[in-house]
Image (spheres, helix red, strand yellow):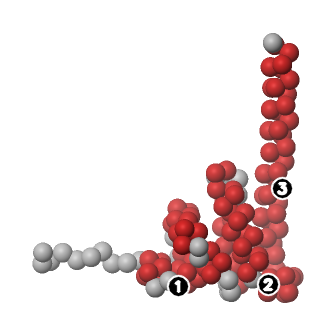
Amino acid sequence: VRGLRRPKLTRVEHQLKKFQYREALKVALAQKSGVYTVYALLDEFSRRGALPQALRGAEESTALALVDFMGKQIGKRPERTRQLLEILWTFLETNGWISEVGGETAPLMRALKKVENRLMEELSTMHDLETFVGFVEMIGGLAT
């Protein structure tokens, strides 16, 4: 049918179509595409087995944007925590330059510290929940 056009691809979709995963992530984070877009992109990388490829060799600005994203998301969506930890682990494994430069990248180190603090808060909450479950089980045992 004449006159019908295909919808124009976004910059992220264009990079993804060309298998330029790192660039797609960089664009999504730089454009502040939205939480759901970034999650969808990360899900797609995982589905394709391309997460290491997407995260390897990240520039400092992309690394900072990704770590900031993780710092904001940890604890907001408990169902995504495992995925975020996998991403963080893969990111740190594939970007050895982070441990080499250390304090030279102060904004990135602050962002990583924020992620660490958020993870500690999550662990504390999990501990509190375990204690609560034990208490409820004890009460349940007394009731029978």
Q: Does the residue at mark 2 contact the one at mark 1 (Cβ under 8 Å)?
A: no
Residue 93 at x, y percent in the picture: 77, 77
**What numbered label is drawn on residue 120?**
3
Give the alpha-carbon distance from disc 3 to disc 1, as whole Å. 34 Å
Q: Which residue is mark 2?
A: 96
Q: Amino acid at mark 1?
A: Gln
Task: Name the residue: 75% across, 70% down.
Answer: 89
Residue 20 at x, y percent in the picture: 52, 85
Label 3: which secondary element: helix
Label 3 neighbour load within 10 Å: few <14, some 14-19, many 20+: few
Mark 3 or 1, nearer chain start: 1
Is residue 11 something that shows in the picture?
no
Figure check: 134 above or below 69: above
Mark 2 or 1, nearer chain start: 1
Residue 17 at x, y percent in the picture: 44, 81
Q: Amino acid at mark 2?
A: Gly
